[in-house]
Amino acid sequence: MNDMQWAPIGSEPLPPPLPPTRVDFTGDRSVFRKMVTKGAMLELVTFGFYRFWMVTDIRRHLWSNTAIDGDAAEYTGRAKELLIGFLVALAILVPIYLAYFLVGIEFERWQGFASTPLFISFYAFGQFAIFRARRYRLTRTVWRGVRFWMDGSGWAYSVRAMAWGLLVFLTLGIALPWREASLERYKMQHTHYGDLRGDFVGDGWEFFKRGWWLWLLSPVAVVIFPLAPFVYAEFKAREWRWWLDGLRIGGVNVSSQLPHNAFYGVYWKVIGWWMLLSVLFGLYIAGVTGLIAAAGVAPTGPDAFARSIPFLVAMVIGYLATVLALNVVMRMYLQHDIWVKALETLEVHDIGAAADVQGRGELANALGEGFADGLDVAGF
Amino acid sequence: MPSAKITVFFDGVSSRKRQVSLVLADALEIVEEGAAPVRWAYDDIRRSDSPLGILRLASISAPPLARLEIRDTALGAEVIARCARLDEHLTTGRGVAKIVGWSVAAAVSIVCVVLFGVPLAADRLAPLVPKPIERRIGDASEVQVKTIFGRRVCDDPAGRAAFTKLVNRLRDAAGLDDDSMTAGVLPSAIPNAFALPGGKVYVLNALIDKAENPDELAGVLAHELGHLKHHDNMRGLIYNGGTSFLIGLLFGDVTGSSAVIFASRSVVEASYSREAETAADTFAIDIMHALGRSPKPAAELMFRITGKEGGSGFTILASHPLTEDRLARMTKEDRPASGPPLLTDTEWQALKGICGSGKI
């Protein structure tokens, strides 16, 4: 009865080349919007603590609606892990901050403002956090009952990222494609799906060829503002496509047809919303000012509004609401829509190589996510 | 069975996709042709995340990644009806309420610690900071100050002698340790004076230029000695470090870079520093009285420099009390001089020329 197309390839002497498999996204955009809106409100009333649950919900939604070869992935991470990871990361960061402070004093005694470069050590720590957070997310990613996992060292990655970062700095950004290729190679070669090992075959030169003129254009885009979103969207689309094209897991490979202008709309919509929300915030402040003046609650005097508690409270609430609304907008467009657009144009080849993979790998803890949160370098 | 409605089983050991049929016996039996059936007790079955239209199940007694995917809605409903604890592990409305409740409790306790705990800790700990550590921090800030204002210290011998005399009289009246204090004049066009940790007081030359008599300068110096006496630098350091960490904890960003943190920090810290300034003013008033001089001239000097401050923006963010309020306070404490002048006219003229005759 076994007519399944994923029968092991070895059973046939000469397997015909299988057509590429598509990746489908089955999620409903309005479900996602309701989820992030509700999440933003809960973040407001929980002073931001809800972010662990919010992030987990977003990932669960995106993962479980992403079907490769007809089988949806699953995100098995839970918010409590993130919360614990954050608390543990705090416990580790506190003495580090203290040591940073004391070492800084010794540097300052020696030479004024000599401690400024110490800030770089936090950058290194951030890179470590990025690597470890990725490990956490991967080990929570399950497809067909087998999880992804990672080995490799966060510090080795951090050293690489720092060295490449220095080179990018010295070459005014020209080295960026090679930095990305090298770091991605390190990450992917330490990525596994069961007993399949990942790899990254994209090379820096290829990326450079696709984007060098954007690099030349970027100083112009800084001056002529309306050009900037186009340049950035071009760059991001080319980066995504190059990255996706280079991904390999065992014999499985991926190709992307992402158009170079795929993200224009997304970034312009974010900018449009940002402007709209700024205007609304301005009107709100004006309205509150008028209302308080009319009600005569405020103390009189030239600096009455600065002293007025109701005014300050109203301003803080308005500010938080604006920030959270912007958060919803960014999650909708920059997470959900980019995710969907990238998947739409994705093709997976030789998926048969993943038909009978043995499960491997241990779960990683969420400490890296905690560091990333604490240092403000959090990714997805 | 149509192929769209097949039931698929992943055993959690390999990624092999197994087409199975289900037997709803006293436990759920997952039957794959040519293999031993797998039995899942109904009470162990939990729902997993899945796209719409697929029921994905796991069992807490099976390998953690074993998944059963039922695409047939009717069959799925039959299985669901038997699994009493299917959704037990999911976050419910009550779960969310719990998160909100605990977050609010955590926020309230953090706010209480910021408002009451940290100031208390700073007040208690600051005097306990060992002198050598305080001096090291002071040395570090001194290097920074000198980087900003240039390395030169004003050292006209006669002016230096007059300055030392003035500082020593104030120090004796203040009861500060002999070895713990150094004072100097730096050339700068900004009229100001400040105290650094480890007993360092610096007066910027422009302040001496603007002062019309020794009492004006003495009051300002006494104010700075007040900061030393109260360990305000160390208190501020502990306090600022503590609050920015805690407020960062609240909003989830320990480095404290975002706008909310900056705003709330400024308000909280400014009010703390206003208290410290008021205390230093009190100290200065006491010293000037002890020396038989009036504290009022110092406030007049400050008023001449800053002008009227009220109405110039956000007073809730101001780190000092308003100059007019300080002037009003010191005017109230004005008393006719009962002690000898702090410096003779010659000494005062020498002090005015401490940075050399030329302007900077």
Image (cartoon, coloured by chain):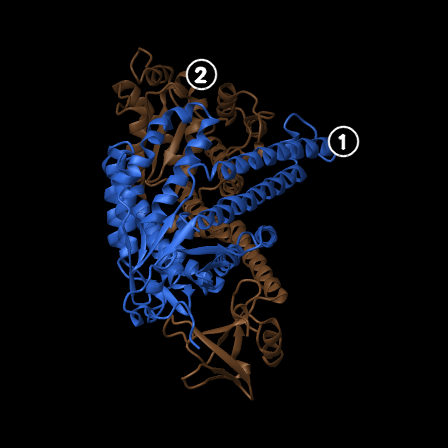
Q: Is residue B175 visible?
A: no
Q: How far apart, in angstroms, are the residues tagged by discs 2 and 1?
A: 47 Å
Give the side of residue B184 with respect to residue B69, left or right. left
x 24%, y 33%: residue:
A170
Foreground pick, B159 / A350:
A350
Residue holding disc 1 = A294
Residue at disc 1, secondary structure:
helix
Residue at disc 2, secondary structure:
loop
Few, some or many residues within 10 Å of mark 2 (<14, 14–19, 20+): some
Q: Is residue B56 depicted above or below A222 in this figure?
A: below
Q: Chain of mark 1?
A: A
Foreground pick, A193 / A139:
A193
The picture places residue B276, in percent across and down from the top left corner, at 49, 39
Residue B212 numbered tag: 2
Give the side of residue B52 with respect to residue B217, left or right. right
Chain B drawing hue: brown
Of tags 2 and 1, which is closer to the observer? 1
Q: Which chain is blue?
A: A
When asked about the image quadrant of residue B13, the answer is bottom left
Q: Is residue A332 depicted above or below B278 in this figure?
A: below
